Image (cartoon, rainbow, N blue to C red):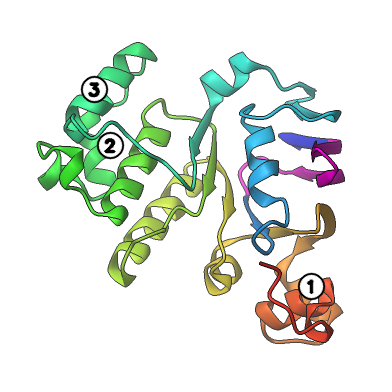
Amino acid sequence: MIIEIKQLNKAYGKFRALDSVDFGIQEGEIFGILGLNGAGKTTFIRCLVHFLRPEKGAIYFNGKILSDSDIHRDFGYLPEDFQPPLNLTAFEFLNFLKYSRGSAVSVRECLEWVGLSRDSKKRIQAYSRGMIQRLGLALALIKDPRVLVLDEPILGLDLAGQRQIFGLLRKLNKEGKTIILSTHIFPHIENFCRRIGIIHKGALRFTGAVEELLLKHHSDSLEDAFLKETGLNNEGGNGE
């Protein structure tokens, strides 16, 4: 396992966002994280990239406690609420961060990967939400990380944009990158991820291959199997 999560706990006051979450992620796999709004997905991701510190538990990377230097060197992160400086162009923004991080990756090539090469000289303030997500992905890639952590990477993208980004992610995965992906769009998880983890009310309810979950619940739909696994098919609520 490249990443091992051991009994991770995080609370906000009396609200327990993560409750003894424990699982592993294999090197070179695409791992999907599923859960409703407020289930604990984003809290888990923020703990993983050291934006938050858990009260208990630990995260291991290559057999050792995950350090800030590991994050800086080996992890690329795209948050759901990525907000770049609006007064810069995409090229200026990435070029500045490229040199500050000592990266050898070409900014122009990186912008081309995410479909922003034609708009690289525009001020970011003129970008749509989908273009900002593309820029966030470019930022996650600028240091050529071993691990990509992506929270809603296709937010604001149209169908063609979604297809392009998932094509890029498949290419990067074939090149050896480990990808951890959180999204509410079940077909993308089903078609793209080798294994998944379901977080519900702060607890890990399932981890394994998509096929295992479908077989467990005698279902041909990941959405249906998810609802059965979490008991939501009997609750009638949306979990918001």
User: Which residue: 64% across, 61% down?
Assistant: 37
- Left or right, 119 with respect to 177, comes to left
Label for residue 156?
none
Label for residue 110?
2
- Residue where numbered disc 3 is placed: 95
- Residue where numbered disc 1 is placed: 213
Q: Nearer the viewer, residue 49 or 32?
A: 49
- Under tag 3, what secondary structure? helix
Q: Position of residue 114 (x, y in %)?
A: 29, 47
Q: Position of residue 224 (x, y in %)?
A: 71, 83
Q: Quadrant of the C terminus?
A: bottom right
Residue 20 in the magenta stretch? The answer is yes
Q: Earlier in the sequence, mark 1 or mark 2?
A: 2
User: Which residue: 67% across, 83% down?
Assistant: 221
Q: Is residue 167 above or below residue 25?
A: below
Residue stretch in magenta? 6-29
* 3 or 2: mark nearer the eye: 3
